[in-house]
Amino acid sequence: MSVISLNVNGHSHSVDVDPETPLLYVLRNDLQLNGAKFGCGVGQCGSCTVIVEGEAVRSCVTTVGSVKGRKITTLEGLGTPEKPHPLQKAWIEEQAVQCGYCMNGHIMAAKVLLDRHPQPTEPQIRAGLSDVLCRCGTYYRIIRAVKRAGDLMKSAGAPRQKE
């Protein structure tokens, strides 16, 4: 066991865990941040996606020791129920979620995409989200939600956050 310092959603946390512990377990079990989901456990489905310094990362296969001191953003770090991030607002408006299991991965991947391409084309959206699986098949609504979020961010003049 080691004390590991993490920067999650702009807050410092110290956790006493084995450095090889998956980041997902620390986020969910120690920090009670449950946006990232355990899906496949091998980094294939994308349900556990978080952003580490601007990159979409699978937290189920990323060790907590490998991200110590790096800036980590989870779904909870994007917005609040009172003031949702444009992506969260767009997801609601487009009813882009059915069961909700893939939602975290799609929103986090979309955040990285929109930070890089504020007004992405449909092929860019498809490519940017291609590594996140949706078992319900709401892909068309998800694509519309990403487009809407880009429009919302543009109209609000929202600054792009550099992770």
Image (cartoon, rainbow, N blue to C red):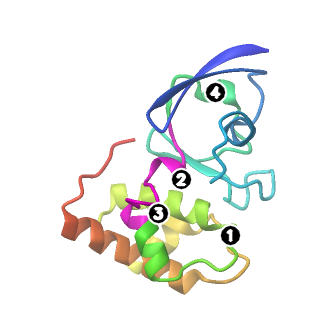
Q: Pointer 2: what residue?
A: 75
Label 1 or label 4, whichever comes before in sequence order: 4
Type of residue at label 1? Leu
Magenta stretch: give its range: 72-87
> Can see residue 119?
no
Residue at the (37%, 59%) spot, across then down: 83
Crowding at dot 1, Cα within 10 Å, few <14 / some 14-19 / many 20+, comes out as some
Q: Name the N-terminal-most of marks 3 and 2.
A: 2
Query: Looking at the picture, which amino acid does disc 2 mark?
Result: Leu
What is the secondary structure assignment of the residue under circle 4? helix
Which residue carries the number 3 mark?
110
- Which residue, given by chain and number where applicable, does mark 4 sit on? 66
Q: Cα distance, mark 1 to mark 4?
A: 25 Å
Q: Can residue 148 be seen in this view?
A: yes
Question: Residue at left 54%, top 47%?
Answer: 74
x and y, in percent, of residue 66 in the image: 64, 27
The answer to which quarter of the image holds residue 139 is bottom right
**In this image, 101 relative to 80: left or right?**
right
Give the residue number, with chain letter if any, for mark 1: 133
Considering only vertical position in the picture, is 41 above or below 105? above
Give the CA separation, mark 4 to mark 3: 24 Å
